[in-house]
Image: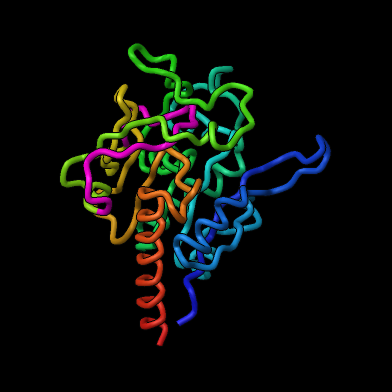
Amino acid sequence: MSRPVIGILCNRYLSEQLRETQLTGRRNIDAVAVAADCTPVLIPALPDAVPVGDLLEALDGVVLTGGRANVHPRHYGEELTDRHGEMDDERDGVALPLVRACIDGGVPIFGICRGIQEMNVALGGSLCPEVGDLPGRHRHRMPKGCRDPQIIFELRERIRLLPGGVLAGMLGTESIVTNSLHGQAVMEPGPRVVVEGWAADDTIEAISVAGAKTFAVGVQWHAEYDAATDPVNRVLYARFGDAARAYRKRRRAVAA
């Protein structure tokens, strides 16, 4: 059987301050191709170009990548302020309905960084624009001005996992250490969102979806970094790939 096809959602990017492009980082592609053993295809974050129904007819799974832009606060009932930072309305226009369609259709979905935030908002939750501003919380951003990937993606955040939860079951542990590279974070979980992991300051770092038919997990850290060898990220991508293979098999059986 050919490998499952995984859609990787891109971000808007202005190249050379002139040309509007759609892109994703190489690590996102390699993680799907190597750690998940699936075939990656890029999804432009352009709602008029990629109707969700057409996407799901062609895909066996979806990865919602990280990105600099934040989810627009109108999607969770708040007014836009300077604190909310950069927006990407077109990505919102693809990601939010795509999350709901994947959950409803039993399509495996893996949300990373911005992706966990999109999953929460799509399912009725809210976000905090800068978790470091909350009382008792610390900044979860990368060291300012740093350009060394080994420092940027350093495993500096200890996460406690929900005992008996989806991630604890996958990983065989209730405590992991990950990288930490975000400002925005989940505030109030949506009605179907199960909180699966917390940082030391109680920032939500991992979620699953109650009643999901297949893999439906979001993590706040950059799981695509060192995905082939990191003991946490390797397992998450492998389980996502397994779910995509199972979904592809079911889909082909129905079509036959």
Which residue is found at the position 49% from the left and 65% from the top? 56
State the residue in front, 158 or 57. 158
Quadrant location of the N terminus in the rendered image: bottom left
**Above-or-below relation of 215 to 125:** below
Classify the position of the C terminus by image quarter.
Answer: bottom left
Magenta span of residues: 170-189
Residue 209 is situated, as x and y percent measured from the top left of the image, at 29, 48
Reply above or below: 249 against 99: below
Q: Position of residue 246 (x, y in %)?
A: 35, 72
Asked if one can make out residue 40 in the rendered structure from this viewpoint, the answer is yes
From this view, report whether residue 206 is shown above or below residue 56.
above
Residue furthest top as drawn: 135
Q: Residue at x 38, y 61 (%)?
A: 238
Give the residue furthest to the bottom. 256
In screen coordinates, is 32 left or right of 242?
right
What type of secondary structure mainly makes up the magenta span? loop
- Left or right for 75, reference 19: left
Q: Position of residue 153 (x, y in %)?
A: 50, 36
Hey, which residue is sitting farthest left in the picture?
A: 164
Q: Residue at x 36, y 43 (%)?
A: 123
Please provide percent x and percent y for residue 254.
Answer: 37, 81
Is residue 155 within the magenta segment? no
